[in-house]
Image (cartoon, rainbow, N blue to C red):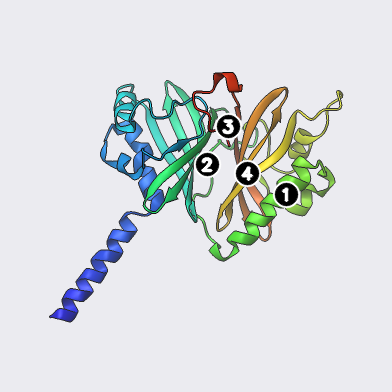
């Protein structure tokens, strides 16, 4: 009997651990924007919460009150894909708050609670000329044993090709035969991708990456958080890549203007 009871306790404990996977907690948290349910908000340690969205006040309104107020506007929230990387959860989201938007959300955990948050959101556009939306495609990570090599490849790609401007090395990192593009302004293959990063007649690049801040990865997916200029606009670039056979084979992204410091509602910075 004692053995049977111990087995039950172990099974119950394992099920409880699975039930509180961090990405599932974040899924419930973000869905509560739609439902107004206050229970999932317990995942956030509001006393120590660091907010990196410059347009959001820090500590002025509790999340439960905020989400309940937002739920009355009948928003729609859908987590398309979510991943875990150590203390981080990163997710690809669809939002409809009067206008349709696509975003990436990043949360940093300490123990069982989220203590820090970053995001990057833009208007939903498309489909692009290859008939891809900004969110369709595979959603589940595989090849978990390749997480670190995929992280390193993506960082090297962004720093070498996009920051340093070595565009001739594009196909060292991107599979020219199978590359799938979800950016609403581009198409499959590397031709339009290469042209997007070339210098214009003015000698400047329209899409100009300056610095990589973070690369998060799980298996065959990696999210790169970068800073630069889109035209003359100081911007944050969030690029999600799917990798296979040692190269990038699929890409999703969002680009968001970084508000000038004089307009920030907190002083934590975008990154």
CA gap, disc 2 to disc 1?
Answer: 23 Å
Q: Residue tagged by mark 1?
A: 157
In which quadrant will I find the N terminus? bottom left
Q: Earlier in the sequence, mark 2 or mark 1?
A: 2
**Horizontal placement of 262 versus 176: left or right?**
left
For discs 3 and 4, the disc positioned in front in the rendered view:
4
Residue 269 on image: x %, y %: 56, 32
For discs 4 and 1, the disc positioned in front in the rendered view:
1
Q: Is 190 situated above or below 57?
A: below
Mark 4 in CB contact with mark 1 (< 8 angstroms): no
**Horizontal placement of 140 versus 33: left or right?**
right
Question: Residue visible at 26% across and 69% down?
Answer: 11
CA gap, disc 3 to disc 4?
Answer: 14 Å
Mark 3 in CB contact with mark 4 (< 8 angstroms): no
For discs 3 and 1, the disc positioned in front in the rendered view:
1
- Numbered label attached to residue 136: 2
Q: Earlier in the sequence, mark 3 or mark 4?
A: 3
Asked if residue 26 shows in the view, the reply is yes
Assign a secondary structure to mark 4.
strand
Mark 2 in CB contact with mark 1 (< 8 angstroms): no
- Numbered label attached to residue 251: 4
Question: Residue visible at 55% across and 19% down?
Answer: 263
CA gap, disc 2 to disc 3?
Answer: 10 Å
Residue 195 on image: x %, y %: 79, 35
Circle 1 crowding by C-alpha within 10 Å: few under 14, some 14–19, many from 20: many
Q: Earlier in the sequence, mark 4 or mark 2?
A: 2
Q: Residue tagged by mark 3?
A: 127
Residue 136 on image: x %, y %: 52, 41
Q: Is 84 situated above or below 252?
A: below
């Amino acid at each position: 009997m004692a053995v049977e009871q111990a087995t039950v306790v172990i099974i119950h404990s394992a099920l409880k651990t699975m039930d509180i996977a961090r990405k599932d907690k974040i899924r419930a948290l973000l869905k509560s924007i739609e439902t107004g349910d206050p229970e999932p908000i317990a995942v956030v340690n509001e006393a120590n919460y660091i907010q990196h969205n410059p347009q959001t006040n820090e500590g002025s309104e509790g999340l439960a009150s905020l989400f309940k107020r937002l739920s009355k506007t009948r928003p729609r929230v859908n987590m398309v894909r979510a991943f875990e990387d150590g203390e981080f959860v990163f997710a690809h989201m669809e939002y409809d708050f009067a206008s349709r938007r696509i975003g990436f959300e990043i949360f940093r955990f300490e123990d069982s609670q989220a203590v820090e948050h970053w995001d990057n959101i833009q208007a939903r556009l498309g489909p692009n000329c290859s008939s891809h939306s900004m969110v369709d495609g595979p959603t589940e990570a595989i090849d978990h044993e390749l997480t670190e090599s995929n992280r390193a490849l993506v960082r090297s790609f962004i720093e070498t090709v996009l920051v340093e401007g070595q565009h001739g090395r594009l196909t060292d990192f991107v599979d020219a035969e199978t590359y799938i593009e979800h950016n609403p302004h581009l198409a499959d293959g590397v031709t339009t991708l290469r042209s997007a990063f070339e210098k214009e007649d003015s000698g400047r690049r329209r899409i100009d990456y300056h610095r990589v801040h973070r690369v998060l990865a799980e298996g065959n997916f990696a999210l790169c958080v970068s800073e630069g200029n889109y035209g003359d606009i100081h911007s944050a670039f969030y690029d999600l890549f799917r990798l296979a056979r040692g190269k990038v084979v699929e890409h999703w992204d969002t680009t968001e203007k970084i508000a000038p410091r004089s307009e920030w509602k907190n002083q934590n910075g975008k990154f």
